[in-house]
Image (cartoon, rainbow, N blue to C red):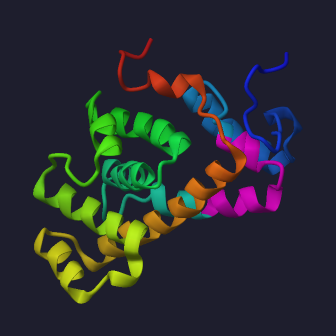
C-alpha cells in the first residue's frame, strides 16, 4: 500500500527489510508500542547510523540513574519545541504524557518551554536544556550553580546536556528528512489505553 504522505523525503525501510539485528531491536519497540516509529524506518536507510543512534539514545533515555525517565522526556519536548521539531514534539510528547500521566503537559511545554509553569526542579532542568539548545556558548558556572541549587546533581546536569545534544541532532535530521510523526503518537497518553 502506498502512503499518501511519505515517512521521509529520503524514503524508508520497513521492519521486515531491516538487517537482522535492527529488525530484532526495533521489533521489540514495535511490539511494545504497537507500531514501528517512523524515525527508525527513516534512519534504517543507513544501518550503521541507526545502530549508533539507538545505542546513544538508549544509554541516555533508558537509564534509571539520576533524572527520572519523565524528566528525560521533559528535556526532549522542551528543546524540540525550541527547535521547532514536529516529529520529536509529537513522538516524545506522547511518551512524556504517558510517563507523567498528564494529558496536557507536553502541549504546554512544547508550545512555550520558557513560560510553562513547572516545579522548581523541572524549571531548572528545562532552563538549562533551553540554554544548551539555543545558546550553549553562553553557559557559565552561574547557570550550573542555579541548577545545583534546584537540586540537580552534576550527573543529572550532564544528562540534561547530553540529551539536549542528542536531540539537537535528531531534530535536525527530522527537519532534513521531513520526518512525519506516526498517527498513533497523537492520542498516546490522552485517552485510556485499550
Q: Quadrant of the C terminus?
A: top left
Q: Nearer the viewer, residue 74 or 152?
A: 74
Please give the name of the residue rendered at 80% of the width and 62% of the height, measured from the top-left corner: 48
Residue 88, position as x, y percentages in the image:
51, 45
Is residue 24 at least partly visible in the picture? no
Q: Find residue 29 and report its horizontal and vertical position in percent.
A: 61, 38
The verdict on residue 190 being magenta is: no
Quarter holding residue 96: top left
Above or below residue 176? Residue 34 is: above
Q: Is residue 21 left or right of residue 121?
A: right
Quadrant housing residue 33:
top right
Quadrant for the N terminus, please. Answer: top right
Q: Position of residue 26 (x, y in %)?
A: 69, 42
Q: Determine the residue located farthest toward the bottom in the rendered image.
A: 141
Left or right: where 94 falls relative to 42: left
Q: Is residue 189 above or below residue 107?
A: above
| Nearer the observer, 20 or 81 | 81
Inspect this view and state whether residue 126 appears: yes
Q: Is residue 53 left or right of residue 168?
A: right
Highlighted magenta segment, given as a residue range: 39-55
Residue at point 19%, 73% (across, down): 147
- Using the image as rendered, state which of residue 190 and residue 81 is in the foreground: 81
Amino acid at each position: 500500500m502506498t502512503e499518501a504522505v511519505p515517512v521521509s523525503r529520503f524514503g524508508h525501510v520497513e521492519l521486515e527489510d531491516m538487517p537482522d539485528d535492527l529488525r530484532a531491536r526495533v521489533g521489540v519497540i514495535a511490539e511494545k508500542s504497537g507500531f514501528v516509529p517512523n524515525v527508525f524506518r527513516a534512519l534504517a536507510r543507513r544501518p550503521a547510523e541507526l545502530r549508533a543512534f539507538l545505542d546513544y539514545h538508549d544509554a541516555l533515555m533508558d537509564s534509571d540513574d539520576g533524572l527520572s525517565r519523565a524528566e528525560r522526556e521533559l528535556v526532549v519536548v522542551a528543546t524540540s519545541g525550541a527547535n521547532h521539531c514536529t516529529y520529536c514534539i509529537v513522538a516524545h510528547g506522547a511518551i512524556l504524557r504517558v510517563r507523567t500521566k498528564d494529558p496536557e503537559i507536553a502541549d504546554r511545554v512544547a508550545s512555550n518551554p520558557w513560560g510553562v509553569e513547572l516545579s522548581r526542579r523541572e524549571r531548572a532542568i528545562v532552563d538549562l536544556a533551553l540554554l544548551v539548545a539555543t545558546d550553549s556558548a553562553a553557559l557559565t558556572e552561574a547557570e550550573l550553580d542555579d541548577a545545583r541549587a534546584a537540586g540537580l546533581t552534576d550527573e543529572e546536569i550532564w544528562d540534561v546536556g547530553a540529551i539536549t545534544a542528542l536531540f539537537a541532532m535528531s531534530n535536525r535530521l527530522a527537519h532534513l528528512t521531513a520526518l512525519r510523526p506516526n498517527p498513533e503518537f497523537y492520542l498516546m497518553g490522552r485517552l485510556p489505553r485499550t
